[in-house]
Image (cartoon, grey):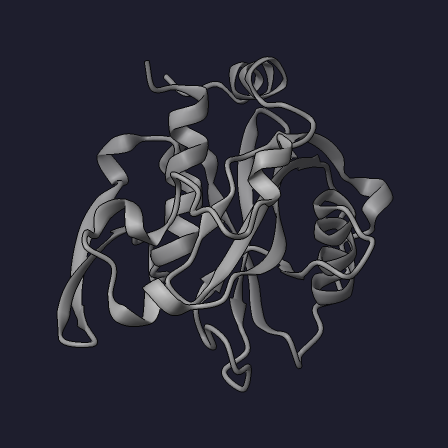
Amino acid sequence: MFSPHDFFARARAKLANSWPETAFDLGARPENGDHRLNHPLTAEEARAPTRPAAVLAPVVLRGDNAFLLLTRRAATLRDHSGQIAFPGGKIESGESPVAAALREAEEEIGLAREKVEILGCLDPYQTSTGFRVFPVLGLTRPPLDLAPDGAEVDDVFETPLDFLMNPANHQLHARLWQGQERQFFAMPWEDRYIWGATAGMIRNLYERLYAV
């Protein structure tokens, strides 16, 4: 049975507080990413420039239950519009991924950085659109007093962590993209379709903490 306290103990024990220098080599493709389930790469993926970005994966502890805070990106955004995502964005010059993740979460959804305890760093995730995403796992507790930026996100919601940390809910879906069938993880929950890079990072979180 899933236990939030066991989850936090595993996160603190197994996740590092930073990434190795090799993670920032934008000329080398990391192991984790959209390409993990898809070989060979499409022509666009092979030539896509890599842009560093950071996201915050905030876990909300409510009594004996824990939830992962997610957003639905605004439909007007240029990249990944309307998709389920973590709060996050590009890393500014001279900024660490952790600082960028906290700043973006504060700007996008109003989650104050002083309300977040950093639990650790997940593996960098390479998207098919050329982003090198550095995911940061954080713990927060109510009251959150969120104030979403309507220009960035259409919705903010919480998904039970016990659902997301159950591998039985990690589905493999596929669709055609640029004439090729592309596989990706998907974790449909209620009327939310969590998929692609976000689901891939959640899968990585599960594997880092629970997979043997």
Q: Quadrant of residue 178?
A: bottom left
The vertical placement of 166 against 199, above or below, is: above
Residue 189 visible in the picture: no
Left or right of 121? Residue 164 is: left
Residue farthest front in this picture: 27
Q: Residue at x 50, y 36 (%)?
A: 123
> Residue at (32%, 30%) from the top-left corner?
166
Q: Nearer the viewer, residue 4 or 107?
A: 107
Rendered-image quadrant of the N terminus: top left
> Whole-percent x and y of residue 170?
26, 41
Can you tell which quarter of the image residue 59 is in? top right
Residue at point 57%, 24% (across, down): 64
Front position in the image: 62 or 154: 154
x, y percent for residue 18: 68, 30
Residue 33, how many percent across, how many down? 38, 48
* Residue lying furthest right: 114
The residue sitting at 42% across, 47% down in the picture is 29
Q: Hey, which residue is sitting farthest bottom in the picture?
A: 76
